[in-house]
Image (cartoon, coloured by chain):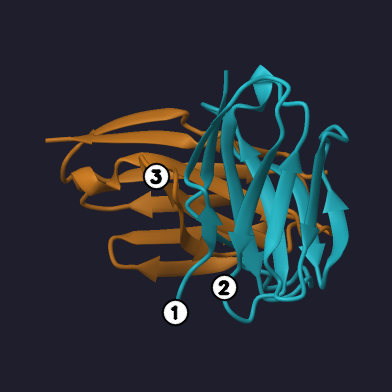
Chain colours: A orange, B cyan
Amino acid sequence: GIQVEQSPPDLILQEGANSTLRCNFSDSVNNLQWFHQNPWGQLINLFYIPSGTKQNGRLSATTVATERYSLLYISSSQTTDSGVYFCAATGTASKLTFGTGTRLQVTL
Amino acid sequence: DAGVTQSPTHLIKTRGQQVTLRCSPISGHKSVSWYQQVLGQGPQFIFQYYEKEERGRGNFPDRFSARQFPNYSSELNVNALLLGDSALYLCASSLTLTVAKNIQYFGAGTRLSVL
């Protein structure tokens, strides 16, 4: 099945800084989603982005399917952005395979 | 509209006991999937159900079972609990089973502690 790798594993930012999170996947994907998991465990959908670029406020994401990677950009980070960011993908089966996540801490 | 709802939110059991977790999908969604997330890792796929039939199973022992009801809600059962079953159990729903544009939406999870 698909393998998903994320980097970096941990990231500490000062409020207002920008960051880029990376997701590499091992095979062609039919679905790629980015999630933010809050401290209570809720997985919040950020983007559905099997290819192309999308933006939502201070967040944007780009997936280059031919090169098997996706990037999540966070601009002007806020303390509320803290948490774990997961990338998850599906191949021919509809189950999501998750990466190990990037733990982001935004400090004042 | 209500999102994916799971109950209970927290549960404490002892080794050897059995547990049932419940999930109600987003209205109109016919597919429900279950994931296990142990501390420090990403969620791992357990089961997928669609139209009351099992459509996918992850690498979990037979102690794990699930079912889906006519109203598309679902239950996950775990028998003979082990300490290693302590985890956050997440339910996700999606409109269909088709892979393309199959966006999955997650509930807040049930946190199971096995003592």
Residue plotted at (38% across, 42% down)? A40
**Location of mark 2 (residue):** B26
Could you tell me which secondary element the residue under label 1 belongs to?
A: loop
> Contact, CB < 8 Å: mark 2 with mark 1?
yes
Which is closer to the viewer, label 2 or label 3?
2
Query: Is residue A78 shown left or right of residue B93?
Result: left
Both marks 2 and 1 on one chain:
yes
Q: Would you name the residue on which mark 1 appears? A: B1
Q: Residue A51, image x and y in percent? A: 61, 66
Observer-nearest residue: A15 or B83? B83
Report crowding for label 1: few under 14, some 14 to 19, many 20 or more residues within 10 A (C-alpha). few
User: Tag 1, which chain?
Assistant: B
Query: Which of the two residues, B102 or A41, is positioned nearer the viewer here?
Result: A41
What subunit carries mark 3? A
Q: Are marks 2 and 3 in contact (CB under 8 Å)?
A: no
Which amino acid is tagged 3? Thr
Location of residue B42 by image quarter: top right
Disc 2 to disc 3, how far (Cα)? 32 Å
Residue B27 disc label: none
Image point (36%, 68%), residue name: A56
Instruction: Indicate the amino acid at tag 1.
Output: Asp
| Disc 3 residue crowd, few under 14, some 14–19, many 20+, Cα 10 Å | some
According to the picture, the residue beneath numbered tag 3 turns out to be: A20
Type of amino acid at the residue the image marks with label 2: Ile
Q: B106 or B67: which is nearer to us?
A: B67
